[in-house]
C-alpha cells in the first residue's frame, strides 16, 4: 500500500506533518492524485524535516493534531494553501496566513450531525447515569429525567442548532447564548453565558474556540450552573478552564460532565476517570465512516481545484 | 425508619412479596398510610409466608421482579387488587385475575419519555461505538452516522412514538410495524417484523410482551436484518430469542445490540460482556427520580381509591 503511495509521480506535492484522524480514509482518495510528503515518516524533528525538504511545497494538509503555527509557516516559504480536515481552524495561525496571502480550506459542516448526536448521547449518558449502570447493578441509583430540563446551548451555529432540534424532540426546554441574538429561532436568548448558566440544568458547549471563548466556562459560570448542573463539551477543550472543571467535579460542586474534547489532547485529566458522573470520549464526535468520506471528498476537491487554478470549494473566510 | 413503618397501625394492609425497583421512593409515599406486609423480611419461603400469614390480605403491590402467578394468587384467597409499579403487566396472570374478579392497576405511561431517551442513548452508543471509545483510544475505530439510517420501530405505542420523534429529529428514516397500521402517523408501515427487518439498518423494540411477541425477534428476523444491523431492546427480554441473539452477536451475524432487558432478569448472558458492539444496561430505562415519584403518586392514589371504594385511577383493562 505504502510503496504505491510513494510511487505516485504527480508533480503536485501535499505535505502532511502528522496524519489527521482516520487519515487512512483520506489517503484512499488522494494518494493516487497527489504526491504525499509524509514528515511523520522521517526520523528528523518536524522543524529539521521542513528545513531539509523542498522549500517549494505549496500545500499542507493538517488537522487539530498539527497546529500550523507562525513557526511552521516560517519554514514553508512557498506555502499557498492550508487544507484542514476539520471544521474548526483554531489550530491554524489565521493572522499569519492572511498576512502571507495563504488561503485556508476546511470541510465545512460535514461533521455537524455526528457531533450533535454525540452531544445528545453524552447528555443522556451523564443525566441518566447510563455509564455507571453499565458496571454497577444498583437498583437505587436514579438518574434525572431529560424531559422538562432546561438545557442551555453555548453557540447556536450549525452544531448548536442541530443539538437544539434533538433536545426539543426529547421534551427539553432549550435556550442559548451566542455573540448575537439570532432572529431565525424562537429559542430564548441570554446575552451572557453567566445568565444562561443561572437559568439552565445543563450546558452544551458547541461554540468555536476563539480569543473570546477561551476559558469562557470558568469558576463563576460553574458556580452559577450549580451543584446539580451538567456540562457537555463537544466544542474545544479550551472553552472550559479545565483545572477548574476537574476541581468542581472532584469536589461535587457541579453535577457531572460529558466530554469529547480536552485542553491538551490527547491527554485527558486522570482525575476524571475515577468519577461516576463523568463520561469521557477521545474527541470522537465526528468519527463515522460516512463523515470521513464526505470530508475526504471535500479535501480532494479543494486540492484538485487549487492545482487546476480553479476556485476552492470550501475556503475559510479570513477577514477577522 | 423501618420501625416507623412497622408502627403504622392502618387497618389497610398492602402485601409486598419482593420490593419493586426503587421501592424506597414508593415507601415514602405509602408507609404512613398503609400497613406494609413485607414478605421479603420473613425467613420463610414466599409460599410458606403467604400460607402462614393473614389470608385476609386484599391488596398486593408488585413489579416485574415478583411474578403474580396463578400459584401466588391461589395463596391469596381474599385478594381484590394487584397494584404494579410498572407499565407492563406481563408478570401478572391476567386470565386468573379476570376469572377471580381481581382488579389490576399499573402506572400508565409515566416511564415512556425516560424509556424512549434510553432507547436513543443505546442506539447512539452502539452505532457510534461510544462505549468502546471510552476505553480504547483508537483513531481508526469508526462508528456509523445515525442521520439517513433506516430505523424500524417494533410497536408504535407510547414509547415507540416517542422514539420515532427523537430519531426523526436526528435525521433518521423511521418506519414501524405493529398489530395494525396506525392512521395517525405518516411513518411507513410494514405489516410484518420480517419485512421491517429487511428494510432497516436497526430495529428498536418497544412493544409489549404478549403471546404474539414472545421470541418474535428470532433467527430469521436477525438474518434479514443482516450483518451490519443493530438491535435495541427497551421492551421485554423475551421479545427476542436470547440464545439466538447471543449466537448472532458472538458470530458477527448482526452488527450490534443495545439492551436494557433480558429473558431471565436480573441475569445478563455473560457472553455479552466481552463484546465491543454490545451495550448492556440493567433494566434501568425508567430509573429517574422524577419517574419514580410520578409512579409512586399513582400507586398511592390507586391504593387510597381502593380502600375508599372509589374508582381506581389507572385500572388496566382486562378484556383480552
Image (cartoon, coloured by chain):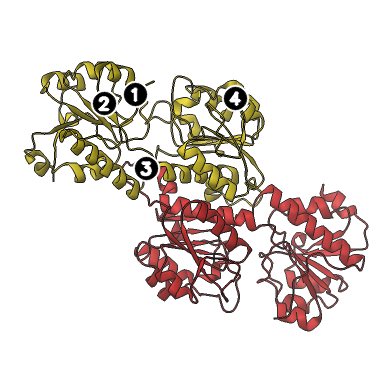
Chain colours: A red, B yellow
Q: Residue A32: percent from the left, percent from the top?
A: 88, 52
Tag 2 and tag 4, C-beta contact below 8 Å: no
Q: Nearer the viewer, mark 1 or mark 3?
A: 1
Within 10 Å of the Cα at label 3, are there few (<14), some (14-19), or many (20+) other Cα atoms?
A: many
Mark 4 and mark 3 in contact (Cβ < 8 Å)? Answer: no
Q: Which residue is mark 4?
A: B192
Say whether disc 2 or disc 4 marks the residue closer to the N-terminus.
2
Q: Which residue is mark 1?
A: B318
The lab-note entry on whether marks 3 and 4 share a chain reads: yes
Callout in the foreground (2, 4): 2
The picture quadrant where one finds residue B267 is top left
Q: Earlier in the sequence, mark 1 or mark 2?
A: 2
Identify the secondary structure beneath mark 1: loop
Q: Residue at x 93, y 59 (%)?
A: A10
Which chain is mark 4 on? Answer: B
- Label 3 or label 2, whichever lies nearer to me, is 2
User: Which residue in the structure is indicated by mark 2?
Assistant: B103
**What is the CA distance from the residue labelled 3 to the residue labelled 4?**
28 Å
Q: Position of residue B235 (x, y in %)?
A: 45, 33
Query: Is residue B132 among the parts visible in the rendering?
Result: no
Residue linked to disc 3: B110
Residue B61 at what x, y percent from top left? 23, 32
Whole-number angstrom distance, CA of label 2 to CA of label 4? 33 Å
Mark yes or no: residue A306 visible.
yes
First-in-chain label (3 vs 2): 2
Amino acid at each position: 500500500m505504502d510503496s504505491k503511495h510513494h510511487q505516485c509521480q504527480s508533480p503536485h506535492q501535499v505535505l502532511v506533518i502528522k496524519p489527521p484522524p482516520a487519515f487512512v480514509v483520506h489517503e484512499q482518495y488522494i494518494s493516487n492524485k497527489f504526491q504525499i510528503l509524509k514528515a511523520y515518516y522521517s526520523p528528523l524533528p518536524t522543524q529539521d524535516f521542513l528545513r531539509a525538504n523542498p522549500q517549494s511545497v505549496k500545500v499542507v494538509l493538517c488537522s487539530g493534531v498539527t497546529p500550523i503555527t507562525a513557526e511552521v509557516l516560517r519554514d514553508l516559504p512557498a506555502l499557498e494553501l492550508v487544507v484542514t480536515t476539520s471544521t474548526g481552524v483554531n489550530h491554524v495561525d489565521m493572522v499569519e496566513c492572511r498576512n502571507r496571502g495563504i488561503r485556508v480550506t476546511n470541510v465545512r459542516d460535514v461533521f455537524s450531525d455526528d457531533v450533535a448526536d454525540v452531544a445528545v448521547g453524552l447528555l443522556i449518558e451523564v443525566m441518566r447515569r447510563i455509564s455507571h449502570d453499565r458496571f454497577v447493578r444498583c437498583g437505587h441509583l436514579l438518574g434525572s429525567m431529560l424531559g422538562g430540563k432546561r438545557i442551555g446551548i453555548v453557540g447556536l451555529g450549525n452544531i448548536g442548532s442541530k443539538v437544539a432540534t434533538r433536545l426539543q424532540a426529547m421534551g427539553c426546554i432549550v435556550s442559548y447564548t451566542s455573540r448575537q441574538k439570532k432572529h431565525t429561532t424562537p429559542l430564548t436568548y441570554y446575552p451572557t453565558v453567566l445568565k444562561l448558566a443561572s437559568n439552565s440544568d445543563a450546558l452544551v458547549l458547541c461554540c468555536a474556540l476563539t480569543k473570546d471563548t477561551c476559558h469562557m466556562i470558568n469558576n463563576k459560570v460553574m458556580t452559577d450552573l450549580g451543584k446539580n448542573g451538567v456540562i457537555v463539551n463537544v466544542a474545544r477543550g479550551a472553552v472550559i478552564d479545565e483545572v477548574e472543571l476537574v476541581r468542581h467535579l472532584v469536589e461535587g460542586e457541579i453535577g457531572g460532565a460529558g466530554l469529547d474534547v480536552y485542553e491538551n489532547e490527547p491527554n485527558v485529566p486522570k482525575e476524571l476517570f475515577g468519577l461516576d458522573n463523568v463520561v469521557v470520549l477521545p474527541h470522537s464526535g465526528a468519527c463515522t465512516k460516512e463523515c470521513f468520506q464526505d470530508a475526504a471528498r471535500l479535501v480532494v476537491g479543494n486540492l484538485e481545484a487549487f492545482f487546476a487554478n480553479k476556485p476552492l470549494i470550501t475556503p475559510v473566510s479570513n477577514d477577522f
